[in-house]
Each structure stands twice: as structure tokens, then as C-alpha cells.
Image (tube, helix red, strand yellow):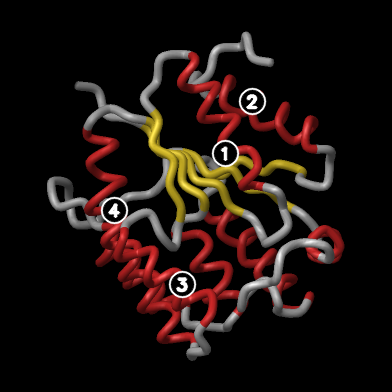
């Protein structure tokens, strides 16, 4: 069976990325794909427990990082890798780029240690040691932090990250930009300041260009 493909959705809180996941899953299923929709932190019973701790319990940056990668390891082992091996499409709300953006750039945690953990946790045992699991494409919803903050004003009770100030999110946004610059082939930048319809059209155009969607889309 042909291997599947892996699409991650990234961006600061308020960028609107999550609202596009279900429509994309529907479009892909309409074209005959089997789609697994998941998220990070989370995606498994264990990882969802760790997510609750991360979003609501106070901890230092190192503890955050270790919990994020522990959740990711279980998620990869139990959900992502099996789905890809079955030839499915995996749509994931955040992946490792978020860790480099939030814990790395936002919290100021060592990118060297993050890269080491990334290597350990995402290594693919059947391939050379230098090969790690990454998304085939990362849809980056790029939005100025001030615009994101305005969108979140009337949102639900903020979690521990959503409640942080604009300076933090400015660092996170720069972290995403730096990560995209390091891997420009994988990243697709979407102008998330546009209307949801315009953002959706950008997203579809990017996937059509890569041959993962037919052009006939609503």
C-alpha cells in the first residue's frame, strides 16, 4: 500500500488555523482519501492527559518541553505512524514547529536541546538515523500578534498560553518565521489576516499546486 501524507497546521493562537481542518478533511474524503484528524498536544488518551497539564498547570519551560515531547512520542507511535502506514492522510493541528515557536522562541528554551529531542522522539526506526518524521507540508497561518489578540478578546476563557501577552506572541510569530526560513519547501505561508474565505482559497491553491487536491473544489 502506498504511504499516506502528513499535513500540519501551525500559527499563533487566534490565527484561525483550526477552523480550516474540518473543511479540508471533508474535501480530501470527497476525493477518496481516508483522513485521520488529530492534534498536539493530544491525539491519544495519554497525550490528552498531558495536554490538560500543559494548558492549565504552572510549570517551567523544561517541564513543558519534556511533557510536549512525551505526548508527541505516544501520538506518533499510536496514531500518526500507523495511519501513514495504512496510506491515510493525517491532518494535525500543530506539531513540532509549535514547540520551537512556543517553548523555543516564546519561552527562550534552548533550540539545541529541542533539536536533540526532536531527533530522538521523531526518529524513524526503519530509515537512517538522520531521518526524522516531519509533515510533508506545513500550512502556516501567519498573522500579526495584535490582530490575533483582538480576535481572542471575546473567545472562551483563555488557557495558560492564550493568556500570555503580545510580546510573547511576537516572539512566537518570529519563531515560526525562523522555522519556515529553515525549511521553505515544507512550509506554505498563508496570509491569515485575510477573510476566512480568502484564506481557504490560499490553502486550496497550495494543495492543488502540490497535486494533493483536484482543482474542482468549492
Tag shown at residue 204: 2
The tag earlier along the polypeptide, 1 or 4, is: 1
Q: For the residues carrying marks 4 and 3, which lies nearer the camera in this image? A: 3
- Labels 2 and 3 touching (C-beta < 8 A): no
Tag shown at residue 21: 1
Tag shown at residue 93: none
Check the image and report above or below for 189 versus 102. Answer: above
The tag earlier along the polypeptide, 1 or 2, is: 1
Tag shown at residue 76: 4
Residue sitting at x 61%, y 78%: 160
Q: In the image, 200: left or right of 36? A: right
Q: Distance of mark 1 from mark 2, alpha carbons?
A: 12 Å
Element marked by disc 1? helix
**Residue at numbered disc 3:** 52
The tag earlier along the polypeptide, 3 or 1, is: 1
Q: For the residues carrying marks 3 and 1, which lies nearer the camera in this image? A: 3
Check the image and report above or below for 212 versus 180. Answer: above
- Labels 3 and 1 touching (C-beta < 8 A): no
Amino acid at each position: 500500500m502506498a504511504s499516506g501524507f502528513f499535513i500540519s497546521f501551525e500559527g499563533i493562537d487566534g490565527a484561525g488555523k483550526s477552523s480550516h481542518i474540518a473543511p479540508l478533511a471533508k474535501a480530501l474524503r470527497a476525493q477518496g482519501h481516508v483522513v485521520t484528524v488529530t492534534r498536539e498536544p493530544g491525539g491519544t488518551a495519554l497525550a490528552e492527559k498531558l495536554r490538560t497539564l500543559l494548558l492549565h498547570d504552572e510549570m517551567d519551560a523544561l517541564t513543558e518541553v519534556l511533557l510536549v515531547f512525551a505526548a508527541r512520542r505516544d501520538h506518533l507511535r499510536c496514531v500518526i505512524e500507523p495511519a501513514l502506514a495504512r496510506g491515510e492522510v493525517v491532518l494535525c493541528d500543530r506539531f513540532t514547529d509549535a514547540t520551537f515557536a512556543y517553548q523555543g522562541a516564546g519561552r527562550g528554551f534552548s533550540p539545541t536541546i529541542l533539536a536533540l529531542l526532536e531527533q530522538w522522539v521523531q526518529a524513524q526506526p526503519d530509515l537512517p538515523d538522520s531521518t526524522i518524521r516531519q509533515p510533508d507540508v506545513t500550512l502556516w497561518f501567519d498573522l500579526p500578534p495584535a490582530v490575533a489578540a483582538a480576535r481572542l478578546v471575546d473567545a472562551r476563557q483563555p488557557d495558560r498560553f492564550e493568556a500570555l501577552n503580545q510580546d510573547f506572541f511576537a516572539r512566537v510569530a518570529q519563531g515560526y518565521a525562523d522555522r519556515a526560513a529553515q525549511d521553505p519547501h515544507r512550509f506554505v505561508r498563508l496570509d491569515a489576516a485575510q477573510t476566512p474565505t480568502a484564506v481557504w482559497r490560499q490553502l486550496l491553491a497550495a494543495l492543488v499546486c502540490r497535486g494533493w487536491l483536484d482543482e474542482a473544489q468549492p
